[in-house]
Image (cartoon, rainbow, N blue to C red):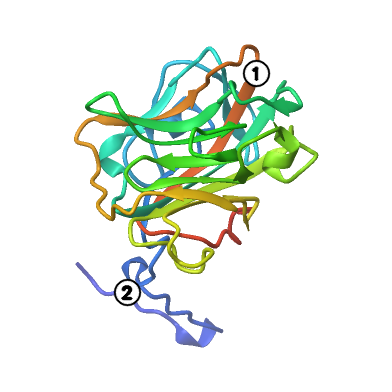
Amino acid sequence: IGVTALDTSIIRRIDFLPPVSSVPLNEGLVLWNGLGSDFEIENSLVGPRGRRTGGRFVNGRFGQSLELTSFEKNALSFPIEILPSPSGCIEFWAKLSEFPADLLPEERPTLISVINERGSCYFQLHLTGNDGSGNGGVCFRIPALGSAGTGPAGRWTYARALGSEYTDDWHHYGFVWNANGIKDIADGTKKTAVFIDGKLNSHSWDFNPNSTLETPKAGAIEFMSCSGLSAERVAFDNLKIWNYPKTTFADRNTK
């Protein structure tokens, strides 16, 4: 091939960098998608491609984001095969627009859901005054494990559910599950939990003693399955799915 001579007298500094493979990057991350364009949705930074059938791209938390209306149900989806089990974490940024002040029991805007091969709900993250299990606010439900809510069912507002009077701002959502109980959450036996803007939002639980959770063989991870709403809009940005019950979100402000 040949030999090249190098005059070392002109070199002031040499940095030896480790190979990329020796530096763990986002260990445990099974999906990372920016959601800022069709190209980003179809070319995940980590994991499989997504699928978009509706919505529009608007200003987001990081660049552009995908906004869906309550009529564009399940217009964004990802393969169910990446869903970790029996523990995991899904996090993303979302912005609610044109939502009312009160969160009524009959209204149940569902930000993310999974319907399995039997047509049953595998899990859902939704906002409601009553999730049917005695919880209200921001509620996360996995029927096989149980459910978590901001507090007891009753009269709720979106501001109270999110823990912020600025309900139309960008907020970070992280929901976590572990069939064997989530460490450092309440007494360690709770199997589902929600974090809003890096803080634990769940303070009410109904849980199933079952400790078995298997990923459905068919279905999809779907966004915006709204119930009882009309003109409301939700924008989504920077989706990540982890294969362990992540409970710290100090990195949420960096893409």
20 relative to 68, above or below = below
Q: Which residue is mark 2?
A: 4
Give x and y (percent) for residue 27: 38, 62
Q: Nearer the viewer, residue 54 or 111?
A: 111
Q: Which residue is mark 1?
A: 232
Which quadrant of the view contains residue 105?
A: top right
- Secondary structure beneath label 1: loop
Q: Amino acid at mark 2?
A: Thr
User: Is residue 255 something that shows in the picture?
Assistant: no
Residue found at x 61% / y 16%: 229
Apparent side of residue 174 relative to residue 114 in the rendered image (left or right): right
* Number of the label disc, if any, that sits on residue 72: none
Distance between the Cα atoms at labels 2 and 1?
A: 65 Å
User: Is residue 22 something that shows in the picture?
Assistant: yes
Give x and y (percent) for residue 71: 53, 12
102 relative to 134, above or below = above
67 relative to 170, above or below = above
Apparent side of residue 184 relative to residue 98 in the rendered image (left or right): left
Give x and y (percent) for residue 215: 25, 43
Apparent side of residue 109 relative to residue 197 in the rendered image (left or right): left
Mark 2 or mark 1, which has the lower sequence index?
A: 2
